[in-house]
Image (cartoon, grey):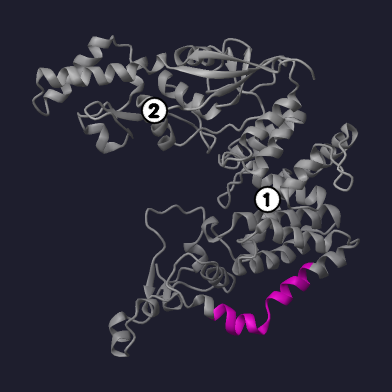
Amino acid sequence: MKGTLFKEVSYSLFKLIEDIDNGEIGLPDIQRPFVWNAAKVRDLFNSMYKGFPVGYLLLWQNSVGGRQRQIGTNAKQKIPDLLIVDGRQRLTSLCSIMKGKPVMGEDYVPKRIQIAFRPSDGKFDVCDAAIEKDPEFIPDISQIWVGGLGSQTFLNQFFNRLRKYREVDEDEVDHLATAIDVLRDLEKISFTVIQLTAAVSEEQVAEVFVRINSKGVTLKQADFILTLMSVFWDEGRAKLERFCRNSRLPSTSGPSPFNYFVYPEPDMLLRASVSLGFRRAKLEQIYSILRGKDLETGQFSNERRVDQFEVLRQAQEHTLDLTTWHEFLKVPLKAGYRAGWQVSSKMGLMYSYGLFLIGRYSFGLDFSSLRSLIARWFFMAAITGRYSSSPESQMEEDLLRIRNLRTAAEFTQALEGVTQNTFTEDYWSITLPGELETSANRVPSLYAYYAALCLLDAKVLFSDLKVSDLLDSAIKSNKGLERHHLFPRGYLRRLGITDLQDTNQLAIFALVE
């Protein structure tokens, strides 16, 4: 494409926030719906207050009305003229603070971000109960812009509250008032904006987004694929996010993915889908495949891209099928795992789901047989930390074992073979006992031990309750899991055992009511 793809313009922060609020600037579907945590928002305001650079913004003139996701939770007045490509986290955070409005958080629940400011030394902080009571702080800086008070009225209220706590002389009044005025004037700060023209295609915008973020830590490889999904299959991206959101919210009106065991993220479900659809785990390769690249020749083709997205569509349809999802959630239960915190690797859980999907839809195994097979696999993967180090490489190797298999019997034999080769006599007699010789309380072998107690229907020490009752995910107690030494420390000291590594070993503890 010839001609200039962009132009450089300058916007005041006030103008940017107003345009976002009334809908003239919106968020395109190639972005994630998450906002920074409060600490990052605090740091952003601190940098702006001190006059530090906070980066440029990348916007795109809209030529595809109606497909973009908008910032915030309220309905906007119009279809955006400009879409945010890069700088979304900053602008979302600034808009939330300066308009006092909630945004969608990582848990898919609207929330307010509350940042506090201490004028005496220009300190910003995330507001908590202590800061809320401290008269030295403005507990919520949003009040400066949206409190409905004039500048002088706001200052009078602040000083009246402070004077109830201590004396304030005229010099300090001037100092504090100046600091508050500097904070209020942050809305006048100018941002440099690189504005892409409407002639730039969606694929080019997606490519720009990937290029400007690929060398940082902002995006993971899964985000690159979600970017492509938003460009070429926005409905699929929306379904993923809706499934994840609903998995966290109890339903009173029908079937839903909600459960007490695991709250999946879009990239986790994506991994299960690509395992089923492409028999691959390395998302870097999947990104190339979905762009229409032939991995052997390196050539790109629009026809190939369409075909590959159709493969992903069918795989995702199976992944998000509620019957299949809930049948899979019985797998960790069958393996003895009763609570999500017992699963030390969520990646391993999702890769197990990928194998579950392959067994079901590629080899036609019934749910009963599949549950038993994948439960043994999951237990093996969990206790050994199979997917804890270099998980993509390990899953790629596992998928390679089954890539050319043709029958359900071959699939079953392949997985059972790996499990049996892992659980050797040496593993049970040497490796596992060695792993239990630790005082750490968050290790896969300990969680597997609890799972074994559940499978054995074991009772809690000195109680008629079962271990599975204590670990039930549906029970939310204000106390943690109770454990007690089987051998009192005084008794161990009399035996000459005093090292904490020995007296607090995992095997010396028992669960109690």
- Which numbered disc covers residue 45? 2
Mark 1, secondary structure of its residue: helix
Which image quarter is the C terminus in? bottom left
Residue furthest out toward the front: 3
Is 311 left or right of 171, judged from the image as shown? right
- For the point 89% across and 45% down, the residue is 297
Q: Is residue 432 magenta?
A: yes
Q: How many marks?
A: 2
Instruction: Evaluate if marks 1 and 2 touch, with contact meaning CB atoms under 8 Å apart.
Output: no
Residue 420 spot, x, y in % from top left: 73, 76
Q: Which residue is mark 1?
A: 326
- Pointer 1: residues within 10 angstroms few (<14), some, or many (20+)? some
- Pointer 2: residues within 10 angstroms few (<14), some, or many (20+)? many
Picture quarter containing residue 152? top left
Q: Earlier in the sequence, mark 1 or mark 2?
A: 2
Residue 294 spot, x, y in % from top left: 87, 43
Q: Which contiguous range is marked in magenta?
A: 415-433
- For the point 58% across and 74% down, the residue is 456
- For the point 32% across and 20% down, the residue is 183
Which image quarter is the N terminus in? top right
Q: Nearer the viewer, residue 230 or 3?
A: 3
Q: Is the magenta region chiefly helix, strand or loop?
A: helix
Residue 246 visible in the displayed image: yes
Q: Is residue 440 magenta?
A: no
Nearer the viewer's eye, disc 1 or disc 2? 2
Q: Disc 1 marks which amino acid?
A: His
Above-or-below relation of 240 to 337: above
Q: Disc 2 marks which amino acid?
A: Phe
Mark 2, secondary structure of its residue: helix
